[in-house]
Image: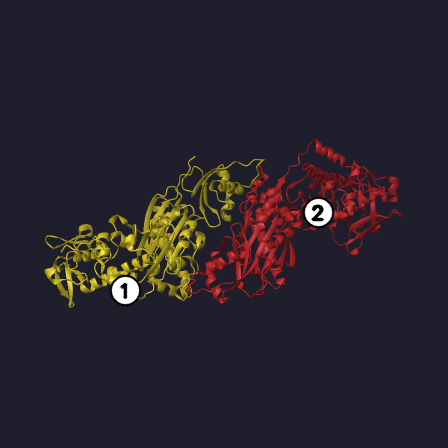
Chain colours: A yellow, B red
Amino acid sequence: MTEYTCKRIILLSLPKPDLKDNTGDADRLVGALKKKSGCENVFIDLDLLRKIPALLREYDYTVRCIVCRERKGLSLLGLTAGEEKRIAAGLAVDLGTTRVVLRLLDLASGDVLGESAFDNPQISVAPDILARIHFSDREGGLEKLQQMVIGQLNRSLSELCASCGLSPEDVYLLALAGNTTMTHLFMGITPHWMIREPYIPAVNNPGFLRTSELGIAAAAHARIFIFPNVGSYFGGDLLAGILFSGMNQMEDTAILVDVGTNAEVILGNKDWLVACAGAAGPALESGVARMGMMAGPGVIDSVEVDRESREFRFHTIDNLPPKGMCGSGIIDLAAHLFLSGMMDIRGRLVPEKCGRHLTEKDGMPFIVVVPADKSASGDDLGMSQADIDSLIRSKAAMYTILRTLTRTVGMEPEELRKFYVAGTFGSFIKPRSAIAIGMIPDLPPESYKPLGNSSLGGAALALMTEDILKESEKIRNRITYIELNVNQELMLRFSAAKFLPHTDPGRFPSVKVWG
Amino acid sequence: MTEYTCKRIILLSLPKPDLKDNTGDADRLVGALKKKSGCENVFIDLDLLRKIPALLREYDYTVRCIVCRERKGLSLLGLTAGEEKRIAAGLAVDLGTTRVVLRLLDLASGDVLGESAFDNPQISVAPDILARIHFSDREGGLEKLQQMVIGQLNRSLSELCASCGLSPEDVYLLALAGNTTMTHLFMGITPHWMIREPYIPAVNNPGFLRTSELGIAAAAHARIFIFPNVGSYFGGDLLAGILFSGMNQMEDTAILVDVGTNAEVILGNKDWLVACAGAAGPALESGVARMGMMAGPGVIDSVEVDRESREFRFHTIDNLPPKGMCGSGIIDLAAHLFLSGMMDIRGRLVPEKCGRHLTEKDGMPFIVVVPADKSASGDDLGMSQADIDSLIRSKAAMYTILRTLTRTVGMEPEELRKFYVAGTFGSFIKPRSAIAIGMIPDLPPESYKPLGNSSLGGAALALMTEDILKESEKIRNRITYIELNVNQELMLRFSAAKFLPHTDPGRFPSVKVWG
């Protein structure tokens, strides 16, 4: 008989009842599951319990059990014939404020079966977190928000399953990572108090819930694991990211940066974790994301200045005519302007170095990468001095956060061994360019590791982690959350970081201006 | 603040949240409950969790929690203001095949608030256990049987609560003791396999269930504890009886006899318990119960023979004209016939001693206690030789069971220290009379203790026992169930016990024939 390495699926050949062993059917199954799993307590939902006598006889006492380890003990999620070959699936959910991503896995192997995504339908009634919290305070608002997202989840899950030849009844376990507000709304729990002093969530540790309690259309006795949050401003999505990075199990101290609506930074190793979130988020958003555009066909994602010709060379996605620039292109451009001497250490464009690439727009210097007659949009593509100033504030904020956080444990950012960057931002920026402008510390390139959607990755990992509750609580309990106080010291660090790459160039030995 | 001695109710004054302690509302409550109860895990149903933030603020963080300790940990059953004076009630249920008895308790004090009873409505579709198991096999039969009993339970509970100025929403915890079949039907679990070799129940240890899962109208998050069974023929009702007797905690070895449809006998002390059930049941039923009648107004419940006049003296319930005789009257009569010499040691009526009380009916000797012209029924009241023979077989069967069971542990029945008799049978028979005919061993009268409805008593005790699951499992796991094999040794013991009081009168030194 096959032995699964994953503890989600347990194969059992039960001793058949006889006159000398009149243990009840359910107790027979529970006893065998206890023995095989090592769990002291095993639970079977009443509705499933009712089916056990007939199922055991139908399967001739040889069964495949799909289980999960909850806080209370092992729960039986489903029971099939021992030789059943149909996949028992799990679903990882990244519940974002704007986008929800699903990944379907085979619970036996961990293999990815498929992925899909949808815009969070709550956007249609309330665009951002604050608006949703206010909407949830209305009569029926909370229920409506919950139903919107769960309704769409059910439809998407059904389609995703169908595309893999499965049905939602084959999905026995879900794991969901989201920020604290999204998680509360998903469970139909009011986030009302999270935006009112002292800003506390209703629940930090929801643990496992029955999907039936939430109206999720999956297997009848499926469970959903909801990642815990540290507080209103540090949600389960980040915790999932930590799990996914593995930094919580490392000897060396690592850092994880997640740039989304906020910039969240977590520093730590297997012994401790400190985290902060903050102001850098909006700054980076306005500095990079808003100025640039979403990556897509025809968008410039890479720029450099040729050392010989001092001309710009760039790359567009799908090699289509250029129509704009995304975050990675903008950081590349800033880095190469600086390295080529076209921009000085204070971020001023230097006319004599920029030559004919420099023009003026709305009374302000503007560096042109693609002139209007060669761009697909019909506009000059490049950056204004104001864009550059904004980018420099952002990169200074980022470096300041990194330095402030590492300083709380007596380290400098340059002493880090691993630097994880989560999100699409992390997947596309080139570390070399970000280092050149002093946005991130001057570490060897191999230290940087983009994680992609770390929240989804963590949720998928949760599906395959035997005692995810214990693992996630271990991470949660180890996190020290630090409020970044805007004091004089921080402002001094911020000012020092507003130079390129820094007022202290010794911090960035690899950055060499060649122009 | 009042401290309840009962661990079902916990008063808490929670630290209020502030900027330095942003623990979530639910986690704050859970943390305090863990500390106060010593339980490692505390669980709150999702629906209740949703209300926690508003309730904590409404009650200003001072709350009364109604809890129970399930297998998984402590469950929160309800939450009120700390100063709430409204009673939090519990309901004990004795789920009999023919009769269901309810007892409402104050969970804080254990005080009895009220009692009520109803005939098990399942009787109307299937009179006995076997018929019900067959009925449950029909399409929709199981559901119908379940709904019948739960429907009537809900109505009776509602009336019982109203009579105490309460509502079913004030009932947070139920405990139910019934035989294995009744318990299965109550949970909607098929008893089908219990009457088919190898006769195994679907579940031995149901533990705690949510009342909402069973359709019981009580507090929204109430639980019901279902007493575990040892097997198809040894149900939770007996286990409740053991708990109620307290024999499982005694140094001295005691015996518990429950005469119902079966005669169930349990022998043991704090270290071990052995049990058997069997053939004596039907024999006793036919011997005593069927021949006699239910106790009620005008029924003879006590008989003696006057030493001087050799006339019968009797007592009727409520002192009404005699219309029949119940079990205790019949045993009294047999004892006094024997002690007065009107009946010999083989149970034959002795004409010269009976005198004019002896007549003949249907060609068979008949001893008249009340002649037809003085009875309310218009019939001679008394016993025929056939009735006596039947009674003697019953008493011999009883003594044989007692002796066989005690012999399995190397004891004689006469070495017992405590003799518990459960059921109405036990409440009414006089030990002196039962000893005189050799039905029960010749122990000092103070050794006998009638328990009344021990199943209900055990259920009520369960409501007030902090960790009833552990207690009941401890009892369950300690029981060795013995099949009484009808072998030659047993038959010899049975034959020896068919004399009055026994072939070995040395076993009954207190029994002295005076006539």
The residue that mark 1 highlights is: A492
Work out which quarter of the rendered image holds the N terminus of chain B and state it.
bottom right
Residue type, numbered disc 1: Leu
Residue B430 in view in this figure: no
Q: Residue furthest top?
A: B488
Which label was assigned to residue A193? none
Q: Residue furthest bottom?
A: A363
Chain where mark 2 sits: B
Residue B58 in picture, x, y percent from top left = 49, 67
Which residue is located at x 34 percent, y 44 percent? A113
Where disc 2 sits, the SS reads: strand
Residue A90 in picture, x, y percent from top left = 39, 47
Residue A362 in view in this figure: yes
The residue that mark 2 highlights is: B421
Q: Is residue B84 left or right of residue B408?
A: left
Q: Nearer the viewer, residue A37 or A122?
A: A37
Residues tagged 2 and 1 counted as in contact (Cβ below 8 A): no
Chain where mark 1 sits: A
Q: Nearer the viewer, residue A274 or A461?
A: A274
Work out which quarter of the rendered image holds the C terminus of chain B and state it.
top right
Q: Is residue A482 left or right of residue B383?
A: left
Residue type, numbered disc 2: Val
Where disc 1 sits, the SS reads: helix
Q: Is residue B107 left or right of residue A323?
A: right
